[in-house]
Amino acid sequence: MINRFENILQAARLKGPKTIAVAAAQDEEVLLAVHKAHELGLAEAILIGHEDQIRKIAAANQLSLRHFTVIDQPDHRAACQKAVELVASGTAQLVMKGLVDTAVFLQAVLAKESGLKTEKVLSHVAVAGIDGFDRLFYITDAAMNIAPDLQTKKQMIENAVQVARALGHEQPKVACICAIEKTNARMQATIEAAALAQMNASGELSGCTVDGPLALDNAISVEAARHKGIDGPVAGQADILLMPDIEAGNILYKSIVFFARGNMAGIVVGAKIPVILTSRADSEIAKLNSIALGVLLASR
């Protein structure tokens, strides 16, 4: 089981290189990450975007582009469409968001003519490494599903389990995060959390252990769970954190990045191929981690 980002990079080197189509690649952190991924043997890249800007950024950072194909397409929407076309044709195995709005990027991925959409729900899974913890956390959803209903949450869990399994975690523990640990008719998230735990108990939701509702503290801390008298199968030991809505997921993601200085990766699961999706504010390291995660998922 992989519990550190260094090991993700090592494992991805054994599975690479894969080819990434990068949409709107005129971004410093993206180019630094793609260049490092090439140096490590993780990935090759096709850079689609404003070619003059791409070359200026590369020159300013002393990055050679001779190993990459550069396609000049300054229009963001067209650049995203081209990146998706390259994946659909088999020229690339991964698609990555560059300096473009997430909505514009995902419209290209989800377009019927892209051939990448499946019947599954697409959801974002963030993988977080935080000092003081002996495991990685899988957080869903910080970027895509705004107010997921019960069935969407079920599929979000299934997508997150897929990511955990790519890192060797065969039976991850899932906490359905809420503000409290008991069901409350006025708090829909707690009702859905209990329903998801029941789905898991009945075998309708398999491949993981699900419990909820759980508050964040007693989901990730054994001491907090013990103090509150919570002793379920997930209490204090959660791997996957199912957030109640996008606000909670996004706030947790950015709190880990900016308060805890955590190590992050982001991926969208549910399409025919992994979709590398990070925030425009994410660091070079987060983008490199996301590439490595995408390579591992593509290899499965």
Image (spheres, helix red, strand yellow):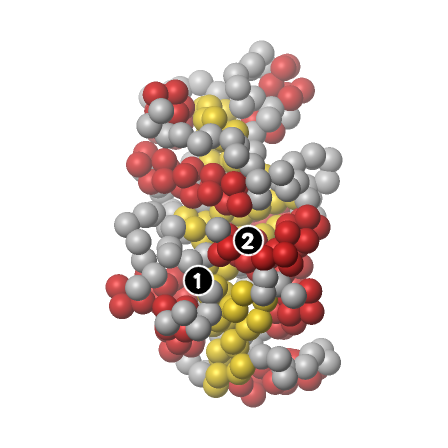
**Placement of 2 over or under 190, stated as above or below:** below
Q: Nearer the viewer, residue 8 or 140?
A: 8
Is residue 194 visible in the rendered image? The answer is no
Whole-percent x and y of residue 161?
Answer: 47, 39
Residue where numbered disc 2 is placed? 296
- Is the residue 271 above or below the residue 29 in the image? above
Q: Nearer the viewer, residue 14 or 87?
A: 14
Name the foreground residue: 102 vs 299. Answer: 299
In the displayed structure image, the side of residue 221 where residue 122 appears, left or right: left
Q: Is 282 displayed left or right of 153 in the figure?
A: right
> Residue 149: which quarter of the image?
top left
Hey, which residue is sitting farthest front in the picture? 14
Q: Residues within 10 Å of mark 2 (few under 14, many from 20)?
A: many
Q: Position of residue 218 (x, y in %)?
A: 58, 23
- Report which quarter residue 260 is drawn in: top right
Residue at left 62%, top 63%?
42
Structural distance between the alpha carbons of marks 2 and 1: 23 Å
Residue depicted at 33% across the width and 28% down the height? 204
- The percent position of residue 85, horizontal first and vertical second, equals 37, 73
Quarter occupied by residue 224: top right
Q: Quadrant of the N terminus?
A: top right
Badge 1: residue crowd in 10 Å (few <14, some 14–19, many ≥20): some
Nearest to viewer (mark 2 / mark 1): 2
Residue 276 seen in the current view: yes
The residue sitting at 64% across, 21% down in the picture is 222
Residue that label 1 marks: 102
